[in-house]
Image: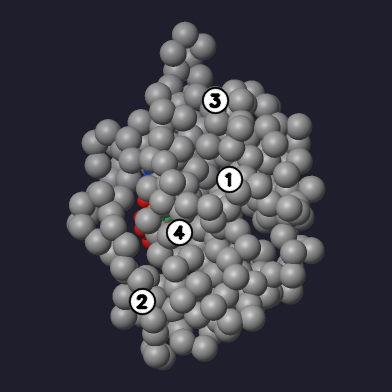
Amino acid sequence: MPLRFQPRLRLRLLPSAAAAAASAPPFPPHGPASATGSSVRLTGGRSRRRRGAAVAMASGDARVAGIASSIRVIPDFPKPGIMFQDITTLLLDPKAFRDTIDLFVERYKDQGITVVAGVEARGFIFGPPIALAIGAKFVPLRKPKKLPGEVISEEYSLEYGTDKIEMHVGAVEDNDRALVVDDLIATGGTLCAAVNLLERVGAKVVECACVIELPELKGRDKLGDRPVFVLVKADGA
Ligand SMILES: O=P(O)(O)OC[C@H]1O[C@H](OP(=O)(O)OP(=O)(O)O)[C@H](O)[C@@H]1O
Ligand SMILES: Nc1ncnc2[nH]cnc12
């Protein structure tokens, strides 16, 4: 199995995430990238903080801090040296889950988005409630050989090797305005493949939206000028 997970990172709040969500258009090319927020420390250190716990509210909106602090970081999963950003704990917290969806909905509700494309598997958690709330269709982008109808595929590179995602032909049309949703951007390979699928059928990709970014992996570089919006960032330790 190729290594998909990246080492030693800790979460940082994006001070402008909530503000950006509220004042959506026009989207900056790289979302709220100029964050200067405090880190969500993962290790005890002098202050003996619990790993993964949010320690500061750098955002003007308390919802972002709550979201960051609800994400558990599991060291050495699935391999030694990897800090796994576990969004299942966010899902256990109904307020944090609702706030996450609300922040995205506030940002995208008036953007004329007609399709939300979610990337398997974790994009299937956040994408559908956003699609329902903004009145868009939801299209699953699936791992190979899962979709029963005719598909188009896009291969993308991983740290070691390649992977592929697929989309049903006819699900997205050339007049669609698309939002791509996933839980996390690391190297950007997955989002890039998703955007390529949508653009190949003529859709306009308005933005990619993720809960978490691992900025050290420079995923945005792979996406060029396609805009990416995230709620929290993970710092290198
Ligand atoms: O930016 P990238 O380097 O492409 O990595 C990000 C992707 O990695 C994770 O999914 P993964 O492929 O591990 O699959 P899963 O959601 O099925 O666990 C994550 O949910 C993103 O989809
Ligand atoms: N560190 C990480 N945590 C969770 N999902 C990931 N996908 C790629 N890197 C990851």
Q: Name the mark nearer the viewer: 3 or 4.
A: 4
Packing grade of label 4 (10 A; few <14, some 14-19, many >=20) is many
Q: Are marks 3 and 2 in contact (CB under 8 Å)?
A: no
Residue that protrudes farthest toward the top in the picture: 46
Q: Residue at x 58, y 82 (%)?
A: 174
Q: Position of residue 138 (x, y in %)?
A: 59, 75
Q: Is residue 60 visible?
A: yes
Element class at badge 1: loop
**Mark 2, residues whose alpha carbon is within 10 Å: few (<14), some, or many (≥20)?**
some
N-terminal label among 2 and 4: 2
Q: Residue at x 68, y 27 (%)?
A: 57
For disc 2, the marked residue is: 153
C-alpha separation, residue under disc 3 versus residue under disc 2: 38 Å
Q: CA distance from mark 3 to mark 1?
A: 20 Å
Q: CA distance from mark 2 to mark 1?
A: 26 Å
Nearer-N-terminus badge (3/2): 3
Q: Which residue is mark 4?
A: 191
Whether label 4 lies within 8 Å of ligand 1 gets the answer: yes
Observer-side mark, 3 or 1, equals: 1
Classify 65 as above or below 28.
above
Q: Which residue is identified by label 1? A: 30
**For the residues marked 2 and 4, what is the alpha-carbon distance in whole angstroms?**
13 Å
Q: Which label was assigned to residue 39?
A: 3
Residue 91 visible in the current orientation: no
Apparent side of residue 113 relative to residue 1 in the rendered image (left or right): right
Say few, some or many: other residues with alpha carbon within 10 Å of mark 1 (under 14 / 14 to 19 / 20 or more).
some
